[in-house]
Amino acid sequence: MDKHETSAEHSHGYGIYILVWLALLSLTAITVAVAGIDIGRFTVATALLIACFKSFLVLNIFMHLKSESRSFRVFVGVAIFFLAISFILLFADYSFQ
Amino acid sequence: MSSDTIALGSNGHEPSYLDYKGKHSGLLGWLLSTDHKRIGILYLSALTVFLLVGVSFGFLLRLELISPGRTIMDPQTYNSIFTLHGVIMIFLFVIPGIPAVFGNFVLPILIGAKDVAFPRINLLSWYLYMIGGLLAVISIFLPGGPADTGWTFYIPYSVRTGTNVMLALFAAFTLGFSSILTGLNFVTTVHRLRAPGMTWFRMPLSVWSLYATAWIQVLATPIIGITLLMVVVERWLGVGIFDPALGGDPVLFQHLFWIYSHPAVYIMIVPAMGVVSEIIPVFTRRTIFGYKFIAFSSIAIALFGSLVWAHHMFTVGMSDTGQFIFSFLTMIVAIPSAIKVFNWIATLYKGSIELAPPMLYVLAFIFLFSIGGLTGVMQGVLSVDIQVHDTSFIVAHFHYVMFGGTGFGFFAAMHYWFPKMFGRMYNQKTAKTAFWFLFIGFNILYFPMFIMGWLGMPRRYYDYLPEFQSYHLISTIGSWITVLGIILMFYNLIRSLKNGQIIKEKNIWGGETLEWQIDTPPIHENFYEIPVITSRPYQYKNNEEVLTHKEHK
Amino acid sequence: MISTQAAEVHVHRDDVGSRMGMWLFLFTELLLFGGMFILYSVYRFTYAEEFHRAAKELNTVVGAFNTAILLTSSLTMVFSIIAIQRDQKSLSLLMQALTILLGLFFMVNKYFEWTSKFHHGIYPGSDELLSRSSGEILFFGLYYVMTGLHGIHVLVGMILIAIMSRFTIKDLITHDNYVRLENIGLYWHLVDIIWIFLFPLFYLIT
């Protein structure tokens, strides 16, 4: 275990971050545009899907999750899983009332 | 591989952590210490006080219930006392209990580390614990009186009652934050600070338990944090969240409350199971049976334990589908716990059993936890739960698991690690006597509750029908015997701090984990040199010799 | 980080461990807000129509603008770390300052949004709000609590970045010791992610 490991190995140039930022802004614009179109329930689903993808970009690129060791990604998976399962089981009650 | 060794003095004689003089001395040397061992002792001191307060409240409750009608207090007081009993016992004793005291003291040593990953945050955890405890105590004395909602703070009563619910909520929130920081610390410690050669499957089983528990602490606690915060906001600012008068859904509060509070019971029990796994090999002189099964079962309990929360809510009007799903999942969560029990018993079989005090508590744990766990499975059956929900049956069940389980596990840990922590031995005869008072008293106190609960005695009721009188009488007498046992146990231990036989040997029990390879009491940094691990723990041979399996560089 | 009291011992740094601790803390934040998202989703499910009606009172343009502000502040935060990695102290400080400034713009917008609502009598416990349907009361209850808690986190983040700036000036954060700046960056990005979800759920359900 190299305890002096720093982030040196994932010091990208500025370029990729600017690209991701532009992508995030575009996705925001798309979300707003889609909200104006009436596609019923799918509006929310689309908005959330886009939000998930934006978060994915922020997590992996801005927060360097992609370049951390695998355990970090497993951790994030576990945390998200716990939140997701709470939603799912909760709706096991509410959607059948 | 670097081994970050520190050799402070070639002879290797250093003062123990108790005598160590760091930047501060005297009381400040303790209150500002970031030494995990001192922090464990700080927790132990505070916890003991809170436990005794919680026990006193329980004692008073049982006195009131010895006969129908008023005995020593009025109904309002009764409601407040069972609330406080729950809040103090759960948030100030059972949840922090083993991780904060023994996890802190022993975890770094068990993995060959000098301290936890974040020592200063560790100290912060203790201060948050103390602040939470203080807030809870203050809530008793301020105008309005102590909260009377039950420790569960159910809506709408918790936003209506004029008692000091806000303070109690802040106390619980602060204590939750303390728990989160401890969990965060332990996860990082186990990942980053294991000694060279200490692979995951060479870790002692109590480390696996503490690790699984730490994850629950990190993930589940924030949910109750936000839920209690919502109640605060609702009380204070009249924001509509749960209050049905404002369109809210009180059942939703219950869902959110139990999404934490069910995993919380696994925060309570899993470390105790870890203690049991730690102690059994030593006093049976056998390698633990099924190491990997026990290790993975801790993870499985943490995982499945987060899927069952609504079994606390079977009578509130959930959908049938929801009820079926949660009942089914509740059956599943019992399996990993059962696996542990089977493995422990298999370890005992043909072992060379020594009934030292730690072992007595461990054997009692297996018996009492089995009863508690099995009655839990009974309650998971929907039709049964309709009958027993909110009766004394439930009260008996959770006391069997939380007190008979975690409580006895805590006492086992105390008797096991006391000599190492303090360099003193307690009177073993007195310890055994205290144990028997406790064990016998415990069953007399709680078993009748199963019966009367089944027959219809409601819980949290101040008064009751005459048909339940004899059960209550027996139970209250049981409480006196139990309390005697507790007092005798603590008297023995506390007295031995000063008067107990001095212990200098490293390994009085013949243990096979790292804490028994170091000085008694440990030096400030635990090890003169960080060990290199070459084999698994609990390697006993032929029930006789103790093999030391650690090579020192 | 293991630090010892004894003078002759070299202090061990564990940047990976430090980041690990921060990520674990971020999970607690994720679940803290997650609990509120759970609340939101159940009430949204129950009161779909009323949520839809209430959401019209929020200004989508301001919301979108605030989203852009926070996304940009995440960018400047990342830049501040790249700069310090390249030993460009002044640039890093500039980026940190910009991040704080963008956070400030966000909060100012929020302030105007909220006060405009108050002006229209829409606040917890107000007669105007209580006269509306349950779903609308709940929508605004959640709106204030969730954006309020988020706002507190933005403020705390700004303060923490300011502290990091002080460390940077005093050379306590340098090109080979910047894990603290990274950790605050992680916190800031999480605050951004939470807003990424808050925005569509409150402003775009019309």
Image: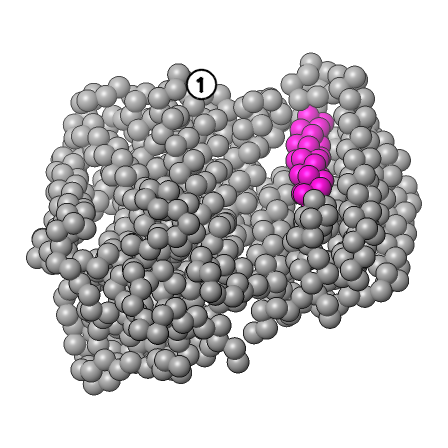
Give the quadrant of residue C143: top right
x and y percentages locating residue B174 in the rendered image: 48, 38
Q: Is residue A64 left or right of residue C61?
A: left
Q: Residue at x 88, y 44 (%)?
A: A32
Question: Does the magenta portion include C66?
Answer: no
x and y percentages locating residue A83 in the rendered image: 60, 52
Give the quadrant of residue B13: bottom left
Q: Residues within 10 Å of mark 1 (few under 14, many from 20)?
A: some
Q: Is residue B236 left or right of residue C116?
A: left
Asked whether B99 or B441 is in front, the reply is B99
Please state, as top left, top right, bottom left or bottom right, where the C terminus of chain C lies in the image: top right
Please state, as top left, top right, bottom left or bottom right, where the N terminus of chain C lies in the image: bottom right
Question: Does the magenta portion include C156?
Answer: yes
Q: Is residue C178 left or right of residue B349?
A: right
Asked if residue B211 is positioned above or below residue C31 in the image, the reply reads below
Q: Main secondary structure of the magenta part?
A: helix
Asked whether B261 or C53 is in front, the reply is B261
Identify residue type, mark 1: Gly
Q: Which residues are magenta?
A: C136-164
SS at circle 1? loop
Asked if residue C40 is positioned above or below residue C140 in the image, the reply reads below
x and y percentages locating residue B47 in the rendered image: 31, 43
x and y percentages locating residue C66 in the rendered image: 83, 39
The residue identified by callout 1 is: B162
Instruction: Evaluate whether residue C150 shows in this view.
Output: no
